[in-house]
Image (cartoon, helix red, strand yellow):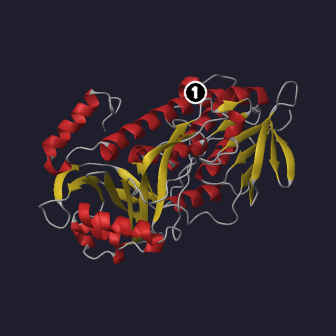
Amino acid sequence: MTELRAAVVGGSIGGCAAALALHRAGVRDITVYERTEGDLAERGVGVAVLEPLGRELTTAGYLAPDTPWAPISRRRWYVRGAGGPLGRLIHTEEPFALRAYTWGALWRGLRASLRGRADVRTGATVHSVIPAAGDALPGAEVRTAAGTRHHSLVIGADGYRSVVREAVSPGVRPSYAGYWAWRGAYPEHRLPGAARWERETAAYVVFDGGHLVVYRIPDGTGGLRVNWVLYTAPPPELERPGPEPGSLPPGTLGSRPYAHLTALAAERLPPFWAEVIGRTDPGELFVQPLYDFTAEPGVSGAVALLGDAATVARPHTSAGAVKALQDALALETALRHATDGTDGTAEVGGRAGALRADRALRADRALRADRAVGALRAYDTVRAARGRALVGLGRRLGRALVETPEDWSTVDDAGLASIWARADAAGLFGGRTG
């Protein structure tokens, strides 16, 4: 039987996880095309993962066991007002089991897992992907500056500006949310009085027009960094973002956005949390205008989408890198069932179960092209449902916390519980407030 030749477009977290999924499902000829040169490990900031999901992804082989993470055991809600530098405490959620990773550490572990398993080509921009049509050889053509190559399977993990998406769901366009995520991270020692903020505590600081999330992440050398993201609309005088998602990386913003943010923090946040923002150097600040969408269908023949190429949800859901890892696990599960000749659709979205890192496929079970295409459809059934749910949840959280928030100045612990109960009764969180 001819060996399947697979391509993954994109070498970020989603792309590396997709390549690992293909390898673990029995594909041995894998090429990863990544448009940027060099190391991606310095990209991104904090990634929060629910503890049960962290264990599942570690068991399944998508999180390296030695990847450093900082525990988050409680979450406290604050608002500006009497109560000291941290503000008035509204509510404490405890226990609250999260793992806080850095994006770079997650990518580095996945990238290392591909050594000897995939041909990773950096600086290789994919210009287009053309699925086979009619009686053509099943699969798709991947076109780069170096030429055109045929692949039996193609996984598009090339992010929110996906080239592959145009081959699968042409015309899908992201929807702008109307507000931004403002982000920063820096060494903990830079923050005076950091001891006032308990270790293993995430803070939600709410205000009229947005909210701030703060937690610690590993620095890679045994220490910790302060990681924060603030959601609010930009001032009218700042240029409105274009029709496509994107971010303004550190060092590119100029002085006006930084001045606006620090003034807003001083006016609306308790003093300690305003200081968290203020201790961020202007060159460390970056912003992400928020968009969302989900591509349906996310598969066309032997071409499938994964991660941000398939779905972008507002980051209130903490679903960016984590969603890509879950997609990869679902893809592996579907392809493994294909090697068995079974459908397995109902199990694709399940837990890791038997997908342990040391499980090996039998040598006499080759992954056939026709079964692989069927597996992609089974995978996309799960991915699309999850994508719809995440996009919907992100929009509802955006309305509740940014666009039409409560008058937080009058809310106490009982009031917050009442807000969530009303929201749950109205179907705001689909019956899953937690």
- Residue 364 is situated, as x and y percent measured from the top left of the image, at 77, 32
Q: Is 239 placed left or right of 10 in the picture? A: left
- Element on which disc 1 rests: helix
Q: Position of residue 115 (x, y in %)?
A: 70, 58
Quarter of the picture containing the C terminus is top left
The picture places residue 80, in percent across and down from the top left corner, at 19, 59
Residue type at the position of mark 1: Thr
Q: Residue at x 64, y 51 (%)?
A: 16
Q: Is residue 428 left or right of residue 251?
A: left
Q: Is residue 269 visible?
A: no
- Label tally: 1
- Given residues 361 and 313, the one toward you in this image is 313
Q: Nearer the viewer, residue 382 or 84?
A: 84
**213 shown above or below 259:** above
Q: Is residue 401 left or right of residue 79?
A: right
Give the camera-side residue of 370 and 273: 273
Where is mark 1, residue-wise? Answer: 381
Residue drawn where x is 28% and y is 77% of the image: 192
Residue 63 visible in image: yes
**Extreme front residue here?**
237
Residue 240 vs residue 271, the one in the foreground: 240
Q: In this picture, is 371 found above or below 212?
A: above
Residue at x 82% of width, y 47% of height: 143
| Image x and y of residue 204, in percent | 28, 54
The quarter of the picture where the N terminus appears is top right
